[in-house]
Amino acid sequence: MRVVFIGPFGLRVKGTMSRRAMPMARALAAKGHQADVILPPWDCPEDSGREWEEEGVGVHNIALPPRFPLLFHLLVTWRLVRRALALKPDVVHCFKPKAYAGLSATVLWFLQKLGLTKVRLVVDSDDREGWGGWNEIGDYTWAQKRFFAWQERWGLTHCDAVTVASRALQTLAWSLGVAPKRVFYVPNGAVINSQFSIPNSQFSIPNSQFTFRVSCFTVLLYTRFFEFRAERVIEVFERVAAEVPEVRFLIVGKGLSGEEEKLLRLTDQRGLSDRIVHAGWVELTELPRYLAAASVAIYPLDDNLLNRARCSAKLVDLMAAGLAIVAEDVGQSSEYIEHGRSGLLVRAGDTGAFAQGVVRLLQDKSLRVALGNEARRRVYEEFTWERLVERIERAYQVGGVNG
């Protein structure tokens, strides 16, 4: 089977294509399928026109047209569709029902209806895009928000099958009238390799006075900062520091629009700055060293539709690293973490219980190790792309919408 994936943006900046689509494509290629990924690299224009092969997967960045208003969007969409069909695929899998991937899916749908292509069309949803989702935090115009909300509804209901990254998105697709047999739950998975093996027992963070040791009491926050209110996390930090005076907090990640600055200002105001190390954005190849420096990881989530619908690859990374995790029980958290076995789950918004969970793990090494080992086992046995690929193959075997 030949499968072509179409993305809404490039590989470098956002995670959908690099952390979801590419692992899917590699898993398909490993099973003998032909897989290609086609991208519109408007967010990393240095990739315009570049092509390469990565672990059996062809990666094709379309050449970006001149940025004339409206015409740019039409030409990008047409180049994505033309490149996809030129590869003569059996299936085209569009990642996100919005933006350029959504526009490409719309064109392919009408080509199907006109009898101009027999390709099977699959749409992937990994976030709530419309109202209550990315429309609430994305830097979009009013017109874009209206259009993206429409695209989400239309795209999920005008395709042969839908793959979804979360149970909430599965429910959303059902609520729009998509038949359950056409909706396939495919959460984000782990890649089986050695990237999360434990490195040397200590390392220094660039531009930091701290040298972290595996034996230190270090609490890791690995985030994009939009998932929670900063004040809640600061309260957790304060409570933990009061119980474990020697604790340090390692913050890895960068906000979408500088949201990390608010959290860092609050640490200064609350007298926590001498306990904080902000590593900023860390490349995936360097990430294992930072994860290995942590004693415990925290995964805070406000209880809202965006967090209920999303399926964070970051949580998978934390589990794959064998970390003991304290997470708020929102959305996909309970799909991955079994409370008391592969991590600790606390009720969303209960900062007291959250802090106590962290303190408990810091003070109980045997529990910490047991939860971390089980987290790693669970994610590598139940949530690998090599296993999840079977669900993707089933989605590709679904007949046409009238079939």
Image: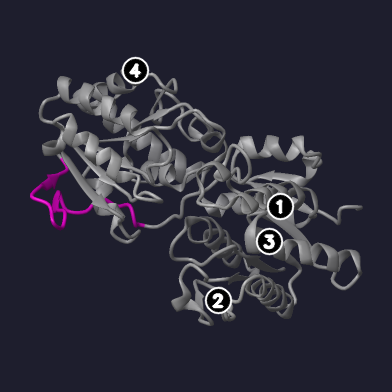
Q: Which amino acid is tagged 4? A: Ala
Q: CA distance from mark 4 to mark 2?
A: 47 Å
Q: Indicate the secondary structure of the residue bearing disc 1.
A: helix
Q: Main secondary structure of the magenta part?
A: loop
Q: Magenta region: which residues?
A: 194-214
Residue at 28% across, 38% down: 263
Asked whether the viewer can see residue 223, the reply is yes
Q: Nearer the viewer, residue 159 or 319?
A: 159
For residue 353, the mark is 4
Residue at 59% across, 49% down: 388
Residue linked to disc 3: 93
Q: CA distance from mark 3 to mark 1?
A: 16 Å
Q: CA distance from mark 4 to mark 3?
A: 42 Å
For residue 151, the mark is 1
For mark 4, does the 10 Å Cα neighbourhood hold few (<14), some (14 to 19), or many (20 or more) residues?
Answer: some
Decide which of tag 2 and tag 3 comes sooner along the chain: 2
Say whether marks 2 and 1 touch (CB < 8 Å).
no
Decide which of tag 4 and tag 2 comes sooner along the chain: 2
Decide which of tag 2 and tag 1 comes sooner along the chain: 2
